[in-house]
Amino acid sequence: MGDVVSSHLDEGKREMIAVKTGDVMRQFSDVYKQQYAVALFNSVRYEIEGGGGPQSQLLHRKDPLAGRSIFSGNLFQYLEENRKWRNRFVSVPNNYSINLYESKTAHERSLHPKVTINCAGYKALTSIEDYIELLNTSLPDVKAKLGNSPFIKCATPFPLILWHPYARHHYFCVMTEKEQQKWHAVLQDCVRHCNNGLPEDCTVQTPAFTDSVRLHRQAKGHYGTWDMMCGTPPQILANLVMESLHPELRNAIGPRLKGKLQQRQRDWMFISDAVYRQVLSQTTNEYDALVETCKTQKVQLDASLRTDMDQIISSKEHVSSKIRALVLPKAESLLKRSVQPYINSILDALMEPTSRGFAEVRDVFFREVVDISKNLLNGGDKEKLGEHMERLSMLAFHPVKMKSCYDNVEELNLEGLQQRFDVSSPSVFVSRAQILMREQMDNAVHTFEQLLQQSLAAQGENDMCKVIQGCQDRVLKKYDYDSSTVRKKFFREALLQIIIPYMLQQLEPSCSPELPRFKELIFEDFSPFLLVENMFEEVVLQSVTKDIMMAVKEAAVQRRHNLYRDSIVMTDSDPNLHLLGKNPPVDWATKFGNGEPEGPSGDADGGSGKRRKQVVSMIQLDEVPQPYESCLDVPGVELIPEEDTVASTDSEEQAEADVCKEPSSPDSVEEIRDLINPVMEVVVPEETKSDASNGTVPTSSNINPEDGAQEEVSHVTAVVEDVPAKSPQEKKSPRSILQQLVGNKKQEADKEEAEIKSAIEEIELAVQEVDGEQTAQVSAGKSDSTPQPPMATDSSPHEEAQPVKNSVNGADNIIDTVEVDLA
């Protein structure tokens, strides 16, 4: 691996990569410094003038995952160094990074993980076919056949692959489909969270950065959405550099790679990862220096803004009116001709899956609360309530329970509109909608917790189900209003993200040459805060905003997707609720439980010895041993073949061997009946045919079968069987047989002894009546020196069953077969 990277990335190549990265960062820095001043002006103006949208009805909590971890468990990881699969303990803390440890013990000792994966920009895959399809884009003019295997051979039929267009790929697999589904949901949640890396509370730095990236790409001719706008700012800048650098290196290095197709793909992945890590290191350092430079100028810029805010606003309005007179006629013509006919189609494509997803969020919350009420009705107490509320508090961050909500938005499809409006992928809108859904679920849960705590303190714990239902109804009303507000805002922003870049691209050739002359109208002291390019975009934005607002309002009036009309206002509908927003989150485990964290422990909390509560439960139960607790070496692909015939044969043989090892379960009626009510047979031959019939004699006793475990005798069934006669010396009396069965077992109660003696007497009387004559003949010829049979002991499994005889007046008689049923 190192030889491949070093041979294709020599010092000259690395120097060239550093130079190109520096060029991109210098261009971006110039734009960022300008946009930073503009963003600061907009932030201060908003602070002075005020404003904002409708007030949220639900409460918010700042750090919902404090003291939590998301998930942990065992995975098989493919190691590139020796091409082997190795068992790893994986932990996902509350920052949604993936930490791989050598074992669970290393994790519990708070050792450093062997690998830490930041999932920004990745895709979580569960099939080799999808992975091969993405690999086909890695090298130019090279396509892998669908039947060909990649450069790895999965150890199980349930793979999990993290794919990135530039960074190294990561390969995992699990043992069962259930594990695969749960891990896939967790990995998708990690990708979703890491992609949303820009904090919205940074009212200056975040808008300055996003506008700078957009303007930089527009200068290169790239309009529209960008699906690699994900991760932290240094990661986004690394993606920005790789967007132009990656194809150039691929065309230069790709033809020089040797070996078969899979080997070339593998080598190119290592080279691309090395380039990406070098670029990311450089962008991180230069971006941090850029941010520090802007922060040092912020104090001076803020003072100038607050001093001359009125003059700056007046100057901006004057210049904007001049630009509007030039741009607005062209924008309205373009809008009427090429945009208005498609607004409703775009809105319908966005609203249908998004509204289904938000409705599913409401249903999931409703079902969880109803389950709590049902459990309390079935005998639950306040400790049970504490357990249920502890789980409910993390519902929004449970990837498996939220998966049904997220899957609805995954169906968002803009096909037919993407090419026209230059939308690279709907993933940008899907990810944003899913983040909003998670926020709304957490707000609903947090509000429910605060209302329930207040109600229980006021009304007591006598009728908790009624209290829970009342709080649930209040929260659902507030959720309906807030989800409507959030969705309408999301639809407006999505329409602007689709339409504005298209209009800018169409208006750019005719309007850009006219813009420089408007710079003369701006005073030099105000020039850092007033940029002609920004005002031009604002004019285009204003031209289309009216149509977008009207389309969303019409959709709300129709109530097709449970949207409230804008005229409905619920401000201060529950004034006491916002007083609860200042209260800290409720610790239900301490309030109603025993104060101990629930479920398996996660990461150590900052090395302080505390354990973090885990949001998602472990797949394997604690009392059931995991099938791969210790590290295992699973053979990988030593030599990468072009065809996968040998590999498939080996996997089939291994699968057949695994099937043979599986124990078979008794599923027939006879086997199940024998397990429930086992039967022990004792053969009793009869010398001559008698008139005795089969019958069952109830009894109560204990015997020791072959395994030595004492069993209770419920009844004795006699079955007549004809066998050759034997000599009187070989015969044994039924009293002797019963003594063998009962043996030297001490009776625990006098009642049991009486029942056994009664059964013996009934058997002897029956035999005497039937075979009286035969008994007299045998007794006349019997010797007094006949040895007595030994007392009953535990018999060996290799001994043959002895015939059972009856002795009356010193004579032996052959009687029926005895079946002993063990209860």
Image (cartoon, rainbow, N blue to C red):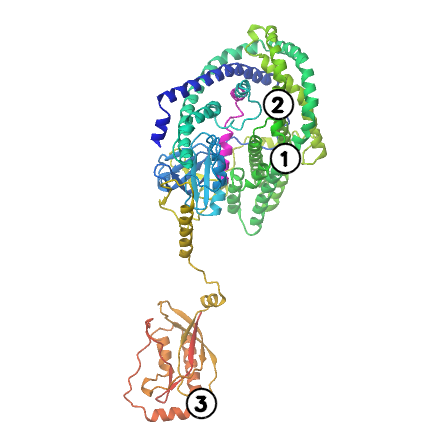
Q: Answer with the quarter of the image where residue 86 lies.
A: top left
Query: Mark 1, mark 2: which one is toward the viewer?
Result: 2
Which residue shows up at 52% across the image and 35% down it? 585
Direction from residue 106 to residue 596 in the image, left or right? right
Does 204 lie within the magenta span? yes
Dominant secondary structure (helix, strand or loop) of the stretch shown in magenta: helix
Q: Secondary structure at mark 2?
A: helix
Q: How many marks?
A: 3
**Residue 51, percent from left and from top:** 63, 21
**Residue 387, percent from left and from top:** 50, 44
- Distance from the alpha carbon under mark 1 to that under mark 3: 90 Å
- Asked whether 271 or 788 is in front, the reply is 271
Q: Secondary structure at mark 3?
A: helix
The disc placed on residue 502 is 2
- Distance from the alpha carbon under mark 3 to that under mark 2: 111 Å
Q: Quadrant of the N terminus?
A: top left
Mark toward the start of the polypeptide (1 vs 2): 1
- Asked whether 161 or 623 is in front, the reply is 161
Marks 3 and 2 close (CB-CB < 8 Å): no
Q: Amino acid at mark 3?
A: Glu
Q: Which residue is disc 1 drawn over? A: 478
Write down the region rendered in magenta.
185-210
Query: Mark 3, mark 2: which one is toward the viewer?
Result: 2
Vertical relation: 89 (above or below) 698? above
Direction from residue 120 to residue 780 in the image, left or right? left
Q: Which residue is disc 3 drawn over? A: 769
The disc placed on residue 153 is none
Q: Amino acid at mark 2?
A: Tyr
Vertical relation: 90 (above or below) 37? below
- Distance from the alpha carbon under mark 1 to that under mark 2: 37 Å
